[in-house]
Image (cartoon, rainbow, N blue to C red):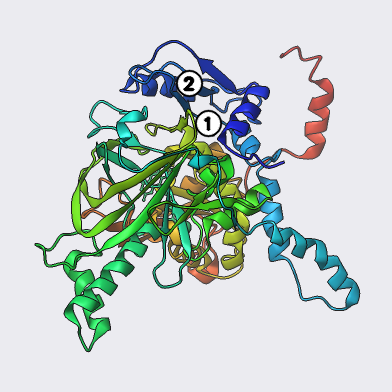
Amino acid sequence: MAYEDLREWIAALDRAGELKKIRTEVDPILEITEITDRVSKMPGKNNGRASSPGGPALLFQNIKGHAGAQVLINQFGSARRMNLALEVDKLDEVADRIRQFIDVKSPQGFLDKVKMLPMLAEMGKFFPKTVSSGPCKEVIVRDNFSLDEFPILQCWPKDAGRFITLPCVVTRDPKTGKRNVGMYRMQVYDGRTTGMHWQRQKVGAEHYREQLRAAEKNRVGTDAPARASVDIMARTSGGSILADGDRPAGKMEVAVAIGTDPAITFSAIVPAPPDVEEYLIAGFLRQKPVELVKCETVDLEVPATAEIILEGHVNLDELKPEGPFGDHTGYYSLEDLYPVFHLTCITHRKNPIYSTTIVGKPPMEDGWMGKAVERIFLPLMKLTIPEIVDINLPVEGVFHNLMIVSIKKSYPGQARKVMNAVWSLGQAMFTKCILVVDEDVNVQDIAEVTLKVLNHIDPERDIQFMLGPVDSLDHASRLPNYGSKMGIDATRKWSSEGFTRPWPDEILMDEKTKALVDKKWKDLGLE
Ligand SMILES: Cc1cc2nc3c(=O)[nH]c(=O)nc-3n(C[C@H](O)[C@H](O)[C@H](O)COP(=O)(O)O)c2cc1C
Ligand SMILES: [Mn+2]
């Protein structure tokens, strides 16, 4: 049964023994981070792997300066809770459901068509539906609103201020009308304005650029609209540079939902293709349609049961320094220019629960969300890169720094083809280092990967460099957002790839001797 809202989810966490309510007074400035960071690194329970960390989700009920407010944090912070959030025993179940849809072949006869009916009925459950009202409208504040009423955290000492860290940011593609929900942090500038940290390659940023292009075409009234589009992008470097006021005016509507049911929150971080609405993904994950309500002051729809909704717009001709912010790389992301979100209205439930997260040195809550993305996306990656057997993005690789891929190698040079394919696949474009290994290497076992990769490579021959877009959080690249990436071909090299030396056997004991020692093992008294 899908969770209707954040409150049902909190109750489920509590029933599962995964929630700790904290009544001691805590400060949203730094103190909640220090507590949550320690809890993130605690040994977890029932996490599948005995060593996997992750203390409980935390519900702070006594927040300094915010009488009556509650803060939920670390809701996804363990493998077990991630499973609970998506209502599965193993994340592979979600991957299996995706695979079922992928595997559909055209029906051959009447019986095949009948067999497909349940699947078609199931698909009907995924589409969001708009309802006339919902709990997020219990309180509507059009005039006297301020973000100061919410217990928004300052996470780390050198952060530029307080940040909303778990917002579902809703925008609309001006061309297709499709909605996007992305999780982009928001720096609080004052009670009514925040930063809007959609990185350049994300869908919210593209929606913004589409508005910018349209406004520019209007402004210059050119006979060559494509040229106007190229010009404005080059002048503003993809929308992220002001270009001395030489930029058209205009507004883009944005709505933000905070404190949604876990499927919606998770859908906002999923690196889906730009044209797939996250509301549909959330419907697929929870197997029940997401209910939406219309906003009061902007033409957008938001989850009806959300705790808090912020409505407003960003101006096309306004950018402001955003950051620094203690980020999931373990370092502060540097200050940069981003659009400014101007609030026009806040609606919320009575006594809203403020849902948030912190990022920092791994492992942390976002690491578990990332691991879930890794498992769920594997079947989709295999659609375009069918030779992939398994992938691992170790949490210390902070998702964009390291991907280990095992492949079924069938032709010379295939490892390099796989690297290029990964770099061309949505947000996997950011992967700084891709390690490609043969299918007999267990990519989930870092010890085995280290042993085999380093034994197998001749570095000068096997490393492939590539220039292109890099993650905005990369602080080492030659330029922000642009730099180099590296692939390592650690597959066994073939003579058809120019490797003509003999390849040694891996050391393995024979079964007969192993059985013999098994029998004697007790008598040897070694345990
Ligand atoms: C806790 C958390 C915070 C995030 N903050 C940002 C952010 O500030 N800016 C950003 O561009 N992506 C951020 N991301 C990653 C995006 O949510 C992710 O790339 C998502 O796929 C973007 O959605 P989109 O493809 O619809 O743009 C964050 C992810 C998590 C889990
Ligand atoms: Mn999206």
Residue at image coords 30%, 28%: 154
Task: Report the disc number at residue 39.
Answer: 2
Q: Which mark is residue 518?
A: none
Q: Kindly tell me whether residue 432 is visible in this rendering.
A: no
Residue placed most toward the observer, 486 or 258 = 258
Picture quarter with the N terminus: top right
Callout 2 secondary element: helix
Q: How many marks?
A: 2
Point out the image quarter for the C terminus: top right
Q: Relative to residue 361, is residue 438 drawn left or right? A: right
- What residue would you read off at disc 1? 77
Image position, residue 140 (x, y; %): 42, 41
State yes or no: discs 1 and 2 in contact (Cβ < 8 Å): yes
Looking at the image, the residue that sits furthest to the left is: 244
**x and y percent of residue 381 in the render?**
57, 60
Amino acid type, mark 1: Gly
* Label 1: few (<14), some (14–19) or many (≥20) C-alpha neighbours in 10 Å: many
Q: Amino acid at mark 2?
A: Val
Near-viewer residue (160 or 136): 136
Q: Residue at x 42, y 51 (%)?
A: 296
User: In x, y percent, where is residue 230?
Assistant: 24, 76
Q: In the picture shown, does residue 39 fall above or below 1?
A: above
Say what secondary structure mark 1 lies in.
Answer: loop
Query: Please, is residue 193 above or below residue 130 in the view?
Result: above
Above-or-below relation of 81 to 377: above
In the rendered structure, which disc, 1 or 2, sits on the residue that comes first in sequence? 2
Please give left or right for residue 383 compared with residue 396 in the image: right
Q: CA distance from mark 1 to mark 2?
A: 9 Å
For disc 2, does the CB lie below 8 Å from ligand 1? no
Q: Is residue 139 visible?
A: yes
Q: Residue at x 53, y 70 (%)?
A: 412
